[in-house]
Image (cartoon, rainbow, N blue to C red):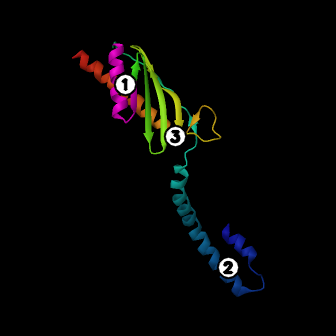
Amino acid sequence: MVRDVLACLALPHSKGRERQWRGTAWLLSALLPALLLTAMLLTTPFLSACSSPERIYHPTTMIEHKLSRAEVRDVIVRCASAQGWWVDDRMPGLIKAVYRDGEQRAEIEIPYNAVRYSIRYLNSSNLRDDDSAFDEINEPYNEWVRELDEAIHEALEALHTKLQE
């Protein structure tokens, strides 16, 4: 296709110039795929660094095993603290936690009992775009919450296994 376009641009009365365009067309048709691939590889990291807003992740997890509310609280506090969350567990049945990563900050609450726990978004700074919808946030928040939810779930399973021994 490139050769056809360049051939159309060649002056028909100049055979030397037409040969020159054909050589250039061959060179461009050979190099164009490599140039496009290089451009894609060079711009992909920059595009992936700009995260687009996602829906805020609000997990609610059912606790499958019989545990006390105090055991559930202890697991949540231990997991959140281990992942760098600052934890306030002064209210029975409710834990508040704050996570900071550089200039980004997220505040959550974790209502819990012996049957289930939830992780709910409360507030944040430098994690939402000005034009984001009320239920959208940038990706780091959801990643932090998913990691916390997975850690709590795994620790609850491990506690149940330990109590069964």
Between 160 and 82, the one lying in front of the other is: 82
Q: Residues within 10 Å of mark 1 (few under 14, many from 20)?
A: many
- x and y, in percent, of residue 56 in the image: 55, 32
Q: Say which element carries label 1.
A: helix
- x and y, in percent, of residue 9 in the image: 75, 76
* Residue with the mark numbered 1: 76
Cα separation between marks 2 and 1: 70 Å
Cα separation between marks 2 and 3: 49 Å
User: From the viewer's perspective, is 108 left or right of 89?
Assistant: right
Residue pictured at 33% horizontal, 21% vertical: 74
Question: In this picture, which residue range is highlighted in magenta?
Answer: 68-88
Q: Is residue 32 above or below residue 103?
A: below
Between 156 and 10, the one lying in front of the other is: 156
Cα separation between marks 3 and 1: 22 Å
Residue pictured at 25% horizontal, 16% vertical: 163
Q: Residues within 10 Å of mark 2 (few under 14, many from 20)?
A: some
Circle number at residue 139: 3
Q: Say which element carries label 3.
A: helix
* Residue with the mark numbered 2: 21
Q: Say which element carries label 2.
A: helix
Amino acid type at circle 3 is Glu
Looking at the rendered image, the disc whose residue lies closer to the viewer, 2 or 1, is 1
Q: Is residue 156 above or below residue 115?
A: below
Residue pictured at 48% horizontal, 31% vertical: 107
Amino acid type at circle 1 is Ile
Residue pictured at 38% horizontal, 16% vertical: 64
